[in-house]
Amino acid sequence: MSDFVTYRGAILPWHCDHMGHMNVQWYVGKFDEATWNLFAHIGLTPSYFRGEPFGIAGVQQNIRYQHELMAGDVIEIRSHLVDARERRIQFIHTMRNAETDQIASTCDLTTVHFDRRVRKACPFPEAVRLAAERLIEPSTRVAKG
């Protein structure tokens, strides 16, 4: 499996700024919602975070804005994993206008699993790491070094 849908929604009038297009804060918010759907898919569910002393921290995020979105546009975000290591996962979200299939924005995000008690990175549970590794397309796999 390479990419899969992690978010679907619509651009509402209050998502838009004084220039009439979706404001950057909403891109970040929609990518964040896609991230939580991606995490749930690999076993990092709300129950996991509520029941365990672990968390996730975003350590690097790069967003590229390619085409503007306007109120009424319907969007879809598809996500794919690029790398899964002992303590971190890297993935890319691609936001498209669902009507035109035009890429509106991409978000490359690296996250780290950490122990909330000591505030330090720690290994993912084995089942989570394996689930993430199964989603990585061999052609996009990052060389481990």
Image (tube, rainbow, N blue to C red):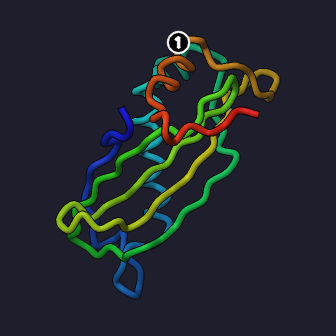
Amino acid marked by disc 1: Ala
Q: Is residue 110 above or below residue 120?
A: below
Q: Residue at x 70, y 19 (%)?
A: 123
Farthest residue toward the bottom? 19
Would you identify the image quadrant in which residue 17 lies?
bottom left
Q: Residue at x 37, y 68 (%)?
A: 104
Q: Is residue 107 above or below residue 23?
A: above
Residue 90: give x, y in percent of width and height: 59, 40
Mark 1 Cα-neighbour bin, 10 Å: few <14, some 14–19, many ≥20: few
Q: Is residue 123 above or below residue 113?
A: above
Q: Which residue is mark 1?
A: 127
Q: Residue at x 55, y 52 (%)?
A: 108
Residue 70: give x, y in percent of width and height: 29, 76
Q: Is residue 27 left or right of residue 90?
A: left
Would you identify the image quadrant in which residue 142 lies?
top right
Badge 1 marks a residue whose secondary structure is helix
Q: Which is more toward the observer, 46 or 82?
A: 82
Would you identify the image quadrant in which residue 20 lies?
bottom left
Q: Is residue 70 left or right of residue 61?
A: left
Residue 8: give x, y in percent of width and height: 27, 50
**Quadrant assignment for the N terminus:** top left
Residue 89: give x, y in percent of width and height: 60, 34
**Quadrant assignment for the C terminus:** top right
Farthest residue toward the left? 99
Q: Is residue 24 above or below residue 144?
A: below
